[in-house]
Amino acid sequence: MAVKKKDIPAIKFWTPLRVVASVIVLGLLAAFGISSCNSNSNERTASLPVVPAVVFDTEMRAANGNPIKLSNYSGKVLFVNLWATWCGPCRSETPELVRLYKEYQAKGVEFVGLSTEDPNTSAQKVRDFVTQYNVGYPIGWATRDVALTLMQGRTTIPQSFIITRDGRLFRKIDGFHPTRTPPELRRALDDALL
């Protein structure tokens, strides 16, 4: 005897148990999503590369005569710019960096400019540059090891690095374009401050 379709009782897909289970699963997914958006800086940046110790621990010469050591800025968002007095794009970028410094200093971002030139032959040029562009943030010279470590084989300048409070490389920006780079720097600094 064949069973006819009309003789089979209909099974309801949305049973009370399935409705409750679906609500629970959706609630857990929503809670996970909210907690992901609200994670602290260390969790958010844990996958970023750590800036090597040679970069943080090396004492470098500053234009004002004081030493510069990037580890002195630990716990703060740090903007490091590699540049040179002879570099045209660096000269174009500097007024924007001065504006960014004035804007982001109050938000807790520290800026350091490191020339890739020889400090013994460029000292006066660097001091004149600082005066000409009214640079208010610390300026000095990157040692060869620091410059090579940061640049990672890319020798073009300027190069800018945004380092998180926990010492990780958040963003690297090569070169300078007058219309694209300033908003890119602002977005990266805002993101690093979250």
Image (cartoon, rainbow, N blue to C red):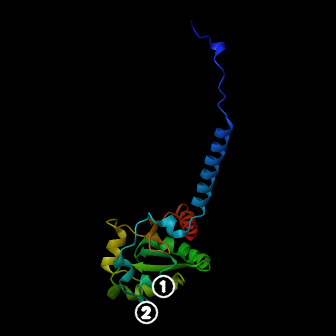
Picture coordinates of residue 86, whole percent (x, y):
40, 76
Q: Looking at this view, name the residue that lies furthest to the right.
A: 16
Q: Quadrant of the C terminus?
A: bottom right
Q: Does the image show residue 2?
A: yes
For the N terminus, give its image quadrant. top right
Vertical position of residue 10 compared to residue 153: above or below: above
Q: Which residue is mark 1?
A: 138
Tell me if label 2 and label 1 are in contact, CB under 8 Å: yes
Return the x and y of residue 104 as percentages of the image width and height. Answer: 59, 76
Task: Tell me the crowding category of disc 1: few under 14, some 14 to 19, or many 20 or more residues within 10 angstroms, Cα based.
Answer: some
Q: How many marks?
A: 2
Spatial CA span between label 2 and label 1: 9 Å
Sequence-wise first label, 2 or 1: 2
Residue 167 relative to residue 118: left or right? right
User: What amino acid is labelled 1 in the image?
Assistant: Pro
Give above or below for 13 relative to 183.
Answer: above
Q: Report which residue position mark 2 lands on.
A: 66
The residue at 59%/11% (across/down) is 3
Q: Residue furthest top?
A: 1
Question: Which is nearer the eye, 37 or 16?
Answer: 16
* Residue 116 appears in the picture as rendered: no
Q: Nearer the viewer, residue 80 or 97?
A: 80
